[in-house]
Amino acid sequence: MANLVLRKGTHSQFQKSLQNNVIEWGTGLTIDQYFDRESTLRGTPYSQKAHFFYVLVPEDDIETTELLAHCEVYEHPALFVSTSGVAQEIKCMAIGSVFCPVEHRGKGYAKIMMNMLYKQLEQDPQVRASTLYSDIGPVFYDRIGWKTMPSKEVVIAVQPTWQVPALCQSITNKAEVDRLVTQDNIMIREEMNKVAQPAFAVLPAPEKIHWIQQRSQFYCEKLGHGDIEVFGAHIPGTDNYVTFFHNFGEKAIYFLRMRSDSDQNTKAFIALAQREALRYDFEKIILWDIPAIDGVGDKQTVIQQREESISALTIFNDTSNVTWLLNEKFAWV
């Protein structure tokens, strides 16, 4: 086997990676539409500053488009509370789109790439943590160093009988998303300083929320629905809010990030999400990392450990038993 290297890929290599993985992540799209979607996402402010692309290639042919394996890496601001009990702002690198072309499978290239990436991140003094979401079970990444974390999901069937309380209003512009998420970040920092055990949390940056919601907008336009008009919900006069992700493939509205002080407000957010779901003939509302909700009835399914998008985390050079807080959909890549 030739000597292999892990390096940041060229534009041509990234284009080739899309040709490779369209079969996995381009369901329902033509290859031109898939390229268009990825170009749209790469043009967002978040992707422009936080997206990196890596390839595993032979050392003697580093610009080849015959890629042995490839992945994408996204930078996240995060907080880490060590045994000292003080929240430190850290850089977290989130791994996504791990892919080995069909013709190269069975040769260990994905494992080689991920081992190299783990070591590279571990040796970077600016990087303290890394996350990923596994669609291939918990074992593969756990053996490399990304430890499987609790991945709870609550699924609520859409029902037309839910009434939206007057206290709950739609978020209909991105500036309001920015305001609420920015305020939320301030509060998260204050709250993390009060955590008494080792803990980790990705911060819900406004530009990251917009990046995920841009995906919704792309599909909304392609399906002839025009523009997404509702980006979430909030309780005026409070800091309670939720941001939405319209997943047209799953016919679901995901809660990206929610701050709620009561079951009453949570149910109000669900009611507004139900109304929004009915607009697009969606079937369910999905929330990550929250307990069962009182008063929802038998339309609620609590999944203790997801089979896809299984959360995994590593804190480099730290052996403490870390709890991942706020492990909601906004942290996904």
Image (cartoon, rainbow, N blue to C red):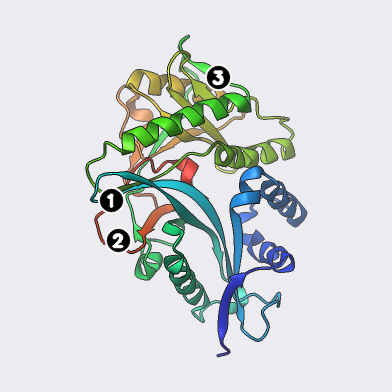
| C-beta proximity under 8 Å, tags 1 and 2 | yes
- In percent of the image, x 56 and y 29: which residue is there? 178
Query: Going by the picture, which residue comes out furthest to the bottom?
Result: 1
- In percent of the image, x 61 and y 63: which residue is there? 53
Looking at the picture, how far across and down is residue 298, in whole percent?
34, 28
Which of the two discs, 3 and 1, labels the residue nearer the N terminus? 1
Kind of residue sitting beneath label 1: Ser
Residue 36 located left or right of residue 174: right
- In percent of the image, x 33 and y 53: which residue is there? 149
- In percent of the image, x 27 and y 36: which residue is there? 194
Which of the two discs, 1 and 2, labels the residue nearer the N terminus? 1
Residue under numbered circle 3: 170
Looking at the picture, how far across and down is residue 268, in whole percent?
43, 19
Give the Cα separation between the discs numbered 3 and 1: 38 Å
Q: How many marks?
A: 3
Residue under numbered circle 1: 82
**300 vs 114, nearest the viewer:** 114
Which of the two discs, 3 and 2, labels the residue nearer the N terminus? 3
Res 179 → quadrant: top right
What is the crowding at mark 2: few (fewer than 14 residues within 10 Å), some, or many (at least 20)? few
Element marked by disc 2: loop
Kind of residue sitting beneath label 3: Ser
Query: Is residue 279 visible to the viewer in this orientation of the structure?
Result: no
Looking at the picture, how far across and down is residue 220, in whole percent?
68, 36
Viewer-side label of 3, 2: 2
**178 vs 235, nearest the viewer:** 178
Viewer-side label of 3, 1: 1
Query: Is residue 130 visible to the viewer in this orientation of the structure?
Result: yes
Residue 271 located left or right of residue 219: left
What is the crowding at mark 1: few (fewer than 14 residues within 10 Å), some, or many (at least 20)? some
Give the Cα separation between the discs numbered 3 and 2: 42 Å
Residue under numbered circle 2: 318
